[in-house]
Image (cartoon, rainbow, N blue to C red):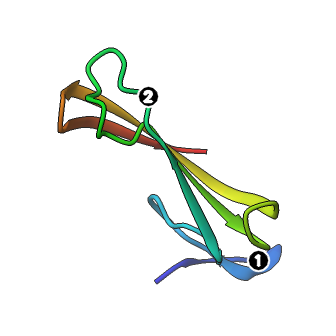
């Protein structure tokens, strides 16, 4: 459940909430601690593959297959 925001009718969501989207793409860097099969960036878009980016998750790895952090932007 979101926290009410008196300046906006939309609730403010906590955490890594992802807005409405209809397309997801992933980037696999395979460098540093990430293995070749580990996604390093997940991009969420609304309006298909050429639509507007609504959120991006960046994943960091401690070792191949072991996520150490996820940052949303």
- Mark 1–mark 2 Cα distance, whole angstroms, equals 41 Å
- Decide which of 68, 35 is in the foreground and name it: 35
Q: Please report the residue visible at 17 percent of the width from the left and 38 percent of the height from the top.
A: 65
Q: Residue furthest front?
A: 36
Q: Earlier in the sequence, mark 1 or mark 2?
A: 1
Viewer-nearest of discs 1 and 2? 2
Q: Is 69 situated above or below 73? A: above
Classify 10 Å Cα crowding around label 2: few (below 14), some (14-19), many (20 and above): some
**Vertical side of 39 occupied by 35: above or below:** above
Q: Relative to residue 39, is residue 50 drawn left or right?
A: right
Location of residue 7 by image quarter: bottom right
Which residue lies at the image location 69% right of the left edge and 64% below the top edge? Answer: 45
Dividing the picture into quadrants, the one containing residue 25 is bottom right
- Mark drawn on residue 60: none
Residue sitting at 31 percent across and 39 percent down? 38
Residue bearing mark 1: 6
Q: Secondary structure at mark 1?
A: loop
Residue 40 in the image: state x and y as whole percent: 43, 36
Report crowding for label 1: few under 14, some 14 to 19, many 20 or more residues within 10 A (C-alpha): few
Residue tagged 2:
29
At numbered mark 2, what does the secondary structure look like: helix, strand or loop?
Answer: loop
Badge 1 vs badge 2, beta-carbon distance below 8 Å: no
Q: Is residue 2 left or right of residue 46?
A: left
Choose between 39 and 59: the one closer to the eye.
Answer: 39
Residue lying at 26% horizontally and 20% vertically, measured from the top left? 33
Look at the image and tell me in which quarter the C terminus lies.
top right
Residue 27: x %, y % from top left: 50, 41
Left or right: where 30 falls relative to 18: left
Image x and y of residue 29, in percent: 44, 28
Left-right relation of 49 to 58: right
Residue 31 lies, in percent from the top left, at 36, 18
């Amino acid at each position: 459940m979101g926290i009410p925001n008196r300046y906006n009718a939309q609730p403010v969501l906590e955490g890594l909430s992802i807005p409405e989207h209809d397309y997801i793409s992933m980037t696999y860097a395979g460098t540093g601690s990430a293995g070749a099969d580990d996604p390093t960036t997940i991009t969420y878009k609304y309006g298909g593959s050429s639509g507007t980016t609504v959120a991006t998750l960046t994943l960091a790895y401690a070792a191949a297959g072991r996520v150490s952090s996820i940052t949303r932007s």
